[in-house]
Amino acid sequence: MFSKETYVNRRAELRKLVKTGIIVLFGNNDSPANCPANGYHPFRQDSSFLYYFGQNRDGLVGVIDIDHGTETLVGDDISIEDIVWFGSVDSVHDMAEQVGVAHSAPMKTLSTICHDALRQKRPIHFLPPYRSDIKIQIFDLLGIHPNQQKESASMPLIQAVVKMRSTKTAEEIEELERAAIIGYKMHTTAMKLCRPGVTEKEIAGVLDGIANGLGSMVSFPTILTQHAEIMHGTPSMAQLQEGKLMLCDAGAENINGYCSDNTRTSPVSGRFDQRQLEIYSIVEECHDYALSVAKPGMKYADVHFAICRLMFDRLKELGLTKGDTQEAVAAGAHAMFLPHGLGHMMGMDVHDMESLDQINVGFDEEVRPNLEQFGTNCLRMGRRLQEGFVVTDEPGIYFIPALIDDWKASGHCQEFLNFDKLETYKDFGGIRIEDDLLITKDGCRFIGKDRIPYHPKDVEAYMAENRQ
């Protein structure tokens, strides 16, 4: 939790941006895993509520009346029965004071606030809900069916939140650096444990434990697999095999809700073979190219496509691609190998503000998404970078057997791809390298003081010295 002044200033700026009406920011409720008394833990607060109201307790709603200049933290104090089981917590009144909110009220008051605003035909601003219980609450309060709530959410509020949360302040960057420390521990541990015979789930379980022990939780479900051609491959009971590659995409969320997100690909044998090294070196070059060119004013879509062209050229040297590189990338041939975007915004959410719709977060009036072309339609971040943005840099090369078969059968991009050569890579898997970049005044830098090894020689040396 930051200082009271931080939250006061954030809400004041939000009022200026939205201009009129009532803002209703819903915090999250506890979510049951399989019965009401057995909930998912730890509790995860809604990020935008946390950003403006700072409190990490369930069952809270923040109300900002822009026209009347009042703010209210709405929620019920816990009962004596709750205190017996869970211990005492601050009253809603005290929590309001801690973040500079002058008023507090029980939850039943929210209905009166909303009904009065509706009767007066005043705008009620809310963000697109993503939990079913909040959708039902909005239905009860405003009479908007859950199927229409995404379209009915306030665009002025969405735009204001995106504008504010996109640019990270110094205190937020400190939090991201703390999350990076946990991420470093997770990834270097994975490299230490990577050896034949260990199961994917065993390593992933250790990483999840590190995130839980040093922070709040993982920032997303850990991806750890020998089948890296599956973008979000979940850990299985399969044992790591000699000669395979282990891809680990994992991150931590620190105690204040800020995230890390890194990916490393390690040789199970401890050393890359020649074919693995050739592909890995291309991904490494693309990763480092982004670091060298990303800066304020640069469209991240331009960085993405520059990397696609670089990747295509290097694959051409290996005989996997052919033809004019510019034409090939324009046709989407690169998506055979890179079917996702270069990166995404990151902050309090690992895909920052994704619940507000990626078209509002990663794009703007100048840079629009291409939703038609395979691969390009997965570009999450395209707009111009600004100082204070935090984005991921995560190029990858994957050999997806089903995709190879599909494109070969249809003849898609056949003038740019050597399908006979691709057939020999169906057993390869995939490689991704990912780091988090802070856009600075003149360029960018890594988030995280310590660098998780990623240059091939550094990876091999670290594994040789540290494998358990």
Image: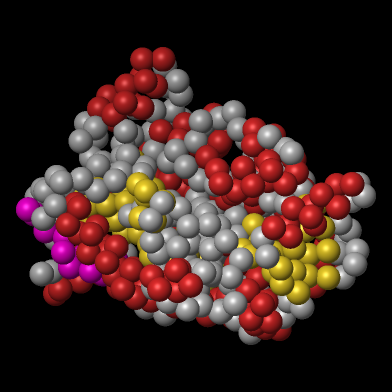
Q: Is residue 453 left or right of residue 242?
A: right
Picture coordinates of residue 4 (x, y %)?
67, 83
Quadrant location, the C terminus: bottom left
Q: Residue at x 34, y 75 (%)?
A: 214
The one of 365 and 148 positioned closer to us in this rendering: 148
Q: Is residue 284 above or below residue 252?
A: above
Q: Is residue 119 left or right of residue 316?
A: right
Furthest residue toward left? 197
The one of 35 and 347 positioned closer to us in this rendering: 35
Image mark count: 0
Q: Is residue 366 above or below residue 333?
A: below
**Colour mapping used in the image:** secondary structure
Q: Is residue 179 above or below residue 275?
A: below
Q: Is residue 321 magenta?
A: no
The one of 238 and 262 positioned closer to us in this rendering: 238
Does residue 39 show up?
Answer: yes
Quadrant location, the N terminus: bottom right
Q: Is residue 119 above or below residue 418?
A: below
Q: Main secondary structure of the magenta part?
A: helix
The one of 35 and 65 positioned closer to us in this rendering: 35
Picture coordinates of residue 100 (x, y %)?
72, 80
Picture coordinates of residue 251 (x, y %)?
38, 62
Q: Is residue 450 left or right of residue 59?
A: left
Q: Residue at x 17, y 68 (%)?
A: 192
Q: Is residue 193 magenta?
A: yes
Furthest residue toward front? 80
Picture coordinates of residue 56 (x, y %)?
54, 70
Q: Residue at x 27, y 24 (%)?
A: 420
Does residue 163 show up?
Answer: no
Q: Quadrant of residue 98?
A: bottom right
Query: What range is drawn magenta here?
Result: 187-197
